[in-house]
Amino acid sequence: MSYISFSMSCILIVSGLGVLLGPNRHPYGRYSTKGYGFFVPVKLAWVVQESPAFFIPLALRLMKGIAWISSDCVLLLFMLHYFQRSFVYPVLITAGKPSPLSVVISAFTFCAFNGYLQARYLLNEVSYEDPRLTSLSYLCGFVIFILGMAINLHSDHVLRSLRKNDSEGGYKIPYGGLFQFVSAANYFGEIVEWWGYALAMSGLPGCAFAFFTTCMLTKRGLDHHQFYLEKIPNYPRDRKAVIPFIL
């Protein structure tokens, strides 16, 4: 591994710890306030802030030429997630508060940073042999990634349906799927996704990203869980926040 990729991975790890230990309820979504300056429409915000993690790996892959390399299979997992998050998820959004410009810029910067790191490492710094694609670590990682993505997509569907059928306004209790066990089933699904990706890659950049995601989404999930408990009197007290039966 190059010094640059190692250093960038360490930055992700330290940043994850900073997020986990930092202040609660960052100004996004339901926590946005007018005190944060200019706001970006929610659909546009998602496209702008997430798409660098798709376009940067795509550009770097095209620069490599058309010859097949086995690490493409791992990179495609990363790009699949961000294609869905950048171009499919925003179209499906039925409701949502505008995002502060500062949050959009921060997310854009992170996605550009991480997209470059993951693509740089996979395209230039590892050389998987073809048998790697049938190895236990890759196959297990692939299955875990797909399982996590399925949980994430189903949970997003449940939340969209809840908002679509909400004629009275206010916050409703989600049911179905992993929401029977946790308040942030969509976050749990994404955490599972990225640990599957890390296992498929079997490299520090993937593990660093999975760790950062776990810290960030765990913190957000705890925020959401506490918010629901405060705002919804009959919210199920036996649900955990992010990780079923644990946290």
Image: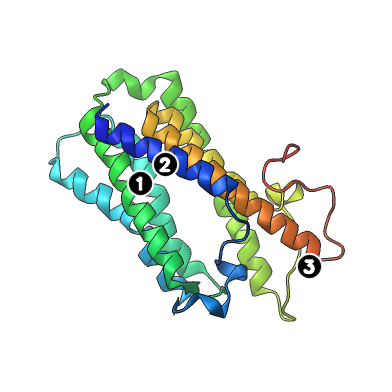
Q: Give the quadrant of residue 233.
A: bottom right
Eyeballing the image, is 22 above or below 41? Answer: above
- The N terminus lies in which quarter of the figure? top left
Three-letter residue code for mark 1: Asn
User: Which numbered marker is on residue 231?
Assistant: 3
At 54% from the left and 78% from the top, the residue drawn is 35
- Percent x, y for residue 97? 55, 75
Can residue 69 be seen at all in this image of the molecule? no
User: Of residues 139 and 33, which is closer to you in this image?
Assistant: 33
User: Of residues 67 and 205, which is closer to you in this image?
Assistant: 205
At 75% from the left and 46% from the top, the residue drawn is 240
Element under disc 3: helix
Element under disc 2: helix
- Percent x, y for residue 33? 58, 76
Residue 219 relative to residue 193: left or right: right
User: Of residues 12 and 88, which is closer to you in this image?
Assistant: 12
- Percent x, y for residue 84? 42, 56
- The C terminus lies in which quarter of the figure? top right
Q: Are marks 2 and 1 in contact (CB under 8 Å)?
A: yes
- Percent x, y for residue 164? 64, 73
User: Which numbered marker is on residue 12?
Assistant: 2
At 45% from the left and 28% from the top, the residue drawn is 199
Q: Are marks 3 and 1 in contact (CB under 8 Å)?
A: no
Q: Report the residue marked by disc 1.
A: 114
Q: How is the image coloured?
A: rainbow
Three-letter residue code for mark 2: Leu
Can residue 52 be seen at all in this image of the molecule? yes
Query: What crowding class fits label 1: few (fewer than 14 Cα within 10 Å), some (14-19), or many (20 or more)?
Result: many
Determine the CA span between mark 3 and mark 1. Answer: 35 Å
